[in-house]
Image (cartoon, helix red, strand yellow):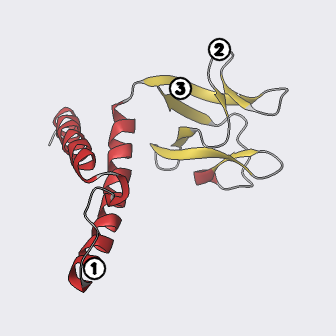
Amino acid sequence: MKYDELKSVFSTLNGQLKRFEDRVGYDAEGLYPPADANERQLHRMARHIVDRLYDVSWQLTYLEKDILWEGSIAKQPNGRYRCGSDGVELTSGNPVEVYIEDDETWELSTVEHNGTDYYIKVLGSNAPIDGVCVRVRK
């Protein structure tokens, strides 16, 4: 399967997941309260499945976004990191893609703070990130 075809399939799947979530609700809150042990089991499993499907939908939605900025990040005087001089300032919780040279691939992660400095989760809480190549999507 070619990547353009895969992106199209992902887009279709994401639309179906969003319609499913609209019908069932986040965390399966749209389901009637279970009446017996069998329904309680199904309800628990449904909540678990819906939670996983929500994660998949978030990832598919993320991949559909355009790349806003790509390049090395630099620490600013305020202690935060910025994507270039005109790019996005990164704070805790920001999703970023990090270029992993050993694998020659982009890895989705988040920026976090360890109490002393910011770090990128996939690199580890003690890994310096000044100069790391990242990309940010809209």
Q: Is 16 left, or right, of 109 in this rendering?
A: left
Taking 106 as reference, is 28 above or below it?
below
Left or right, residue 37 beside residue 73: left
- Name the amino acid, label 1: Gln
Can you identify the residue that label 2 sits on? 86
Q: Nearer the viewer, residue 30 or 112?
A: 30
Whether residues under marks 3 and 2 lie with C-beta atoms below 8 angstroms apart, the answer is no
Contact, mark 1 vs mark 3 (Cβ under 8 Å): no
Question: Viewer-nearest of labels 3 and 2?
Answer: 2
Residue 89 location in percent, x, y? 67, 27
Q: Is residue 43 above or below residue 15?
A: below
User: Of marks 1 and 3, which one's residue comes earlier in the chain?
Assistant: 1
> Between tags 1 and 3, which lies in front?
1
Q: Is residue 113 above or below residue 132?
A: below
Mark 2 is surrounded, within 10 Å at the Cα level, by few (under 14), some (14 to 19) or many (20 or more) other residues, namely few
Q: Position of residue 27 (x, y in %)?
A: 37, 58
Earlier residue among tags 2 and 1 = 1
Query: Residue 88, located in which quarter of the rendered image?
Result: top right
Name the residue carrying label 3.
70
Q: Amino acid at mark 3?
A: Glu
Q: Secondary structure at mark 1?
A: helix
Front disc: 2 or 1? 1
Locate the N terminus by quadrant: top left
**Residue drawn at (47%, 49%), measured in percent from left and top?**
103
